Image: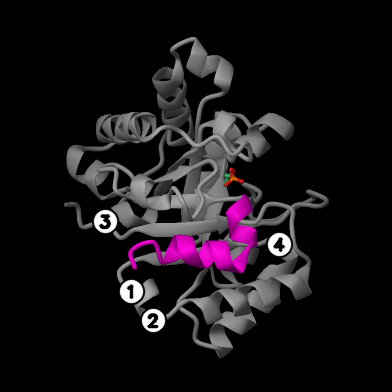
Amino acid sequence: MSDRTPIIAGNWKMHRDHLEAIQLVQKLAYHLDGADYEGQEVVVCPPFISLRSLQTLIQSDKLAIALGAQNCHAEDEGAFTGEIAAPMLARLDVRYVIAGHSERRALFGETDEVVNAKVKAIQSHGMRPILCVGETLEEREAGRAVEVVTEQLRGSLAGVRVADPESLVVAYEPVWAIGTGRTALPEDAQELCGAVRTELASIYDADTAAGIRVQYGGSVKPGNVRELMALPDVDGALVGGASLSSEDFALIVAHRR
Ligand code: 13P
């Protein structure tokens, strides 16, 4: 048994306006009881425009839910029309920021170098990166899954220091499992999350690697979360579609009941 604190995060992607966001978190809180939060972290990552209202709701209702953002720019400020800077997120009590999600890599051209700069920006403002890695179906079928993930980790973590292992989260999200309803087999999820930890041990050291949380992401649902969370190297879940239903996300958070 590891003493890593499990972390369940909902990535809402580009869904829900700010009114729907408030409703979703209120309903989530309604479905959960105190014991569901205990001993694990619960994070919601709404679109930027809802961070302020959710910060207020979480504070006023004293909810044990942390705020996450889905992205940020690597620079602290500047002429970057349409972008959001890490210090702006930190000011809203954002605790986690997703970096290098496969949708950003594939649709917005984010390279490991860009992701690396974002990870550093997130850390430098006291927030915690959720660094996403994962292979495409083509890469998996070519037997290159471990190699691809290893390369993404090396590139995205170049020069990134980790003083407190809980301050870095890595999400292994096989691209072919995202939004497809096709979850990785438990043995494949374990193999790759184990490979992530092995690589983290080589980048840092065994103790640091043993303390870093590794999430699995890709079609996590109430029906499969238990077997995924039981895997030795899976410390959490990064949930897309199912995090948009307060009932489903609550069931995922409450998977230990
Ligand atoms: P789904 O849970 O919808 O497959 O999305 C996973 C994901 O991309 C979370 O970041």
Instruction: Answer yes or no: disc 3 within 8 Å of ligand 1.
Output: no
- The x and y percentages for residue 9 are 50, 58
Mark 1 or mark 4, earlier in chain: 1
Which residue corresponds to the image point at 51% horizontal and 40% vertical from the top-left? 132
As helix, strand or loop, the secondary structure at mark 3 comes to: loop
Which three-letter amino acid code belongs to the residue tagged 4? Phe
Please report whichever mark, 1 or 3, sits nearer to the chain's N-terminal start. Answer: 3
| Crowding near the residue tagged with mark 2, few <14, some 14–19, many ≥20 C-alpha atoms within 10 Å | few
- The Cα atoms of the two marked residues, 1 and 3, are separated by 13 Å
Whole-percent x and y of residue 237? 45, 51
Residue 249 in magenta?
Answer: yes
Per the image, the residue denoted by label 2 is 34
- The residue wearing badge 1 is 38
According to the picture, the residue beneath numbered tag 3 turns out to be: 4
Spatial distance from mark 4 to mark 3, Cα to Cα? 29 Å
Q: Nearer the viewer, mark 1 or mark 3?
A: 1
Task: Point out the quarter of the image occupied by ligand 1.
Answer: top right
The 10 Å Cα crowd at callout 3, few under 14, some 14 to 19, many 20 or more, is some
Residue 231, above or below 124? above
* Amino acid beneath label 3: Arg
- In the rendered image, which residue does mark 4 sit on? 48
Pick whichever of labels 3 and 2 is earlier in the sequence. 3
Of the pair 75 and 1, the residue shown nearer to us? 1
The mark lying in front, picked from 4 and 2, is: 2
Three-letter amino acid code of the residue under disc 2: Gly
CA gap between label 4 and label 2 equals 27 Å
